[in-house]
Amino acid sequence: QVQLVESVGGLVQAGGSLRLSCVASGSIASMNAMGWYRQAPGKQRDMVATIISGGFANYADSVKGRFTISRDNAKNTVYLQMNSLKPEDTAVYFCGYRPGLFTAWRGWGQGTQVTVSS
């Protein structure tokens, strides 16, 4: 099973930017989808952004226009560019993958903390 490791997050002021990366232990080229999810304290894990093998991306309404997901199959890496950050973006961010269209998301790493101060 492919293992995923997220980059270190950080503390950023509201309005700032941060880029997360997620490196896979194996090839992601054949993965149906890669994605970023986040979990705030006391809340469930929610989808932030996903990108399928064809490059089409889907975003949560709360991050549309501010976040951009991309994948570099040659580097087995998925990125999440986060701009215009808000305090409500504070959460632990996880990356995962979906091997096929009707398979479950898996491969969650330890997650990385992103804190946005007001």
Image: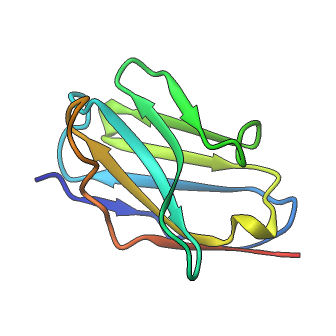
Quadrant in the picture for the C terminus: bottom right
Q: Which residue occupies the foreground of this view, 17 or 35?
A: 35
Based on the displayed image, in which of its 4 quarters is residue 107 positioned?
bottom left
Vertical relation: 35 (above or below) 93: above
Vertical relation: 112 (above or below) 18: below
Q: How is the image coloured?
A: rainbow
Vertical relation: 39 (above or below) 100: below
Q: Is residue 117 left or right of residue 30?
A: right
**Which residue is located at x 50 percent, y 45 percent?**
79
**Which residue is located at x 45 percent, y 22 percent?**
55
Given the current orientation, which residue lies at the most extreme top position?
54
Based on the displayed image, in which of its 4 quarters is residue 99 positioned?
top left
- Residue 94 image point, x, y percent: 43, 62
Q: Which residue occupies the foreground of this view, 18 or 111?
A: 111
**Which residue is located at x 55 percent, y 32 percent?**
58
Q: Is residue 27 left or right of residue 54?
A: left
Given the current orientation, which residue lies at the most extreme bottom position?
42
Vertical relation: 117 (above or below) 59: below
- Residue 23 image point, x, y percent: 34, 52
- Residue 39 image point, x, y percent: 53, 69
**Which residue is located at x 47 percent, y 38 percent?**
50
Given the current orientation, which residue lies at the most extreme left position?
1
- Residue 65 image point, x, y percent: 76, 36
